[in-house]
Amino acid sequence: MSEALQFTGWLFFSALKFLFAPGSIYVVGGYSFWQTIFISVLGGWMGVLGFFYFGKIIFGFFSWLSGRLSTGAKKPKRKMTRMNRFIVQIKNHRLGVVGLALITPSVFSIPLGCILAAKYFGHDKRALPFLMGSVILWAFVLTSLVSYFDFRF
C-alpha cells in the first residue's frame, strides 16, 4: 500500500512541478534511470492532458459567458505588462506551438504552459502531441543530468 501511495505522489509531483520531479524521483525515491523516466513521463502526460482540457473547458465557458453577458459597451483597453508581452511574443513567434511546448516543462510549469496552449493553440491539432513529446524530451534530459552527476548519497 505504501509503495502505491508513493508512486501516486510522484505522479502528481511530475504533473505539477515537472522541472524538479525527475531529480527527486531518482535521488529521493531511489528509482532506477528507466523507472524515473517512466514515472516522470506518465505523471507529465497526466498533467498535460488534464490541464490542457481543463483550460479548453474554462476558456470555452468564459467565451460563452461573455457572449451571454455582453451589453455592447466598449471594453477598456488592456495594459501591456511584461508577462503579457512575453506571452504575445511566444504566440506570434514563428515557432508558436512548438516553442511553447519546448519551454513548458522547463521554464513554465505544466499547468501554466498547458493552459496557455489551450488558450492560444486549442484549435491546433499539433498542440497536444507537441506538449506530450516535450515531456518525453525533458524527462530524458533531466533524468540523464541527474544520473550523470549521480547525486545519490
Image (cartoon, rainbow, N blue to C red):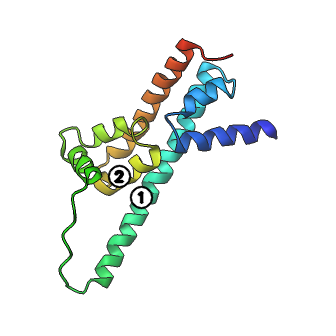
Please tell me which residue is depicted at 27% across the width and 83% down the height of the picture: 70
Estimate how packed mark 1 is, as few (under 14), some (14 to 19) or many (20 or more) residues with alpha carbons within 10 Å. Answer: many
Q: Where is residue 62 in the image (x, y as percent from the top left)?
A: 36, 71
Compared with residue 44, is residue 142 higher up or lower down, i.e. above or below? above
Q: Is mark 1 on a helix, strand or loop?
A: helix
Q: As displayed, is residue 65 above or below residue 43?
A: below
Quadrant hosting residue 146: top right
Of 131 and 28, nearer the camera is: 28
Q: Position of residue 14 (x, y in %)?
A: 56, 39
Relative to 73, is 122 above or below?
A: above
**Is the residue 73 above or below the residue 6 in the image?**
below
According to the image, label 2 marks what residue? Answer: 116
Regarding residue 26, the answer to whether it shows in the image is: yes
**Pointer 2 with pointer 1, Cβ within 8 A:** yes
Judged left or right of residue 96, residue 36 is: right
Q: Where does residue 21 sit, x and y in percent of width and height?
A: 56, 34
Q: In this view, does 41 lie to the left or right of 87?
A: right
Disc 2 is placed on an element classified as helix
**For marks 2 and 1 on the same chain, the one whose residue lies earlier in the sequence:** 1
Q: Could you say which is closer to the camera, residue 65 or residue 85?
A: 85
Query: What residue appears at the point 45 percent right and 34 percent down from the top-left corner?
Result: 135
Tag 1 residue: 55
Q: Find the distance from the CA under tag 2 to the CA under tag 1.
A: 8 Å
In percent of the image, x 48 and y 49: which residue is there?
49
Which amino acid, mark 1?
A: Gly
Residue 123 seen anywhere in this rendered image of the structure: no
Q: Which mark is residue 149?
A: none
Q: In this view, does 21 lie to the left or right of 88?
A: right
Q: Which amino acid does label 2 sit on?
A: Leu
Image quarter of the N terminus: top right
Q: Residues within 10 Å of mark 2 (few under 14, many from 20)?
A: many
Q: In which quarter of the image is residue 68?
A: bottom left
